[in-house]
Image (spheres, rainbow, N blue to C red):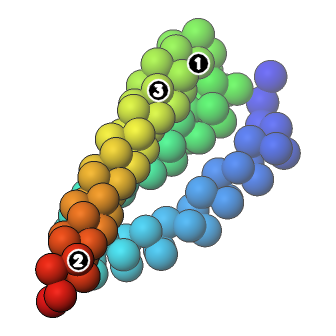
Amino acid sequence: MGLEFNEVVVLVIILGGFLPVIMALRRNKELLVFFLAYMFLLLGAVFTILEGFFWGDIFHFLEHGLGITLAAFLFLASAYASNKKITSIDNCLRKKIKGGI
């Protein structure tokens, strides 16, 4: 099957976003789950390219079963944690405003 242009484009786009994700993680260690999700997304893109050259069935399973699936669950966990933190801050501010700071 070989190398497909769209798979390379996806990998390049993911790699393009890698530096900002690392920089954000260095500033805020709470983004570790988001970083791990991004890493599994990158891993899935690499598996996509590798499946075109050898062990197609194995890398196809790893792409979807490991890369994309774990990335999805970790992105969900990251979004949930972020929303929970924002809601907590919002509730705290509302109490202070209601109480007259």
- What's the residue at 54%, 22% (across, down)? 64
Residue beneath label 2, please? 98
Q: From this view, report whether residue 7 is shown above or below residue 23.
A: above
Q: Nearer the viewer, residue 80 or 63?
A: 80
| Residue 69 % position (x, y) | 46, 26
Residue beneath label 1, please? 60
Query: In front: mark 2 or mark 1?
Result: 2
| Mark 3 neighbour density, 10 Å: few (under 14) some (14–19) many (20 or more) | some
| C-alpha gap between disc 1 and disc 3 | 12 Å
> Which image quarter is the C terminus in?
bottom left
Labelled disc at residue 69: 3
For this orientation, the residue located farthest to the right is 5
**Label 1: which secondary element:** helix
- What's the residue at 63%, 32% (across, down)? 48
Looking at the image, residue 68 sits to the left or right of residue 12; the answer is left
Looking at the image, residue 24 sits to the left or right of residue 10; the answer is left
- What's the residue at 51%, 31% (across, down)? 68
| C-alpha gap between disc 2 and disc 1 | 55 Å
Looking at the image, residue 51 sits to the left or right of residue 86; the answer is right
Q: From this view, report whether residue 92 is shown above or below residue 23.
A: above
**Residue 73 seen by the camera:** yes
Labelled disc at residue 80: none
| Mark 2 neighbour density, 10 Å: few (under 14) some (14–19) many (20 or more) | few
User: Hey, what amino acid is under mark 3?
Assistant: Thr
User: Hey, what amino acid is under mark 1?
Assistant: His
**Label 3: which secondary element:** helix
Q: Nearer the viewer, residue 48 or 78?
A: 78
| Residue 17 % position (x, y) | 56, 67
User: Hey, what amino acid is under mark 2?
Assistant: Lys
**Label 2: which secondary element:** helix
Q: Quadrant of residue 98?
A: bottom left
Of callouts 1 and 3, the N-terminal one: 1
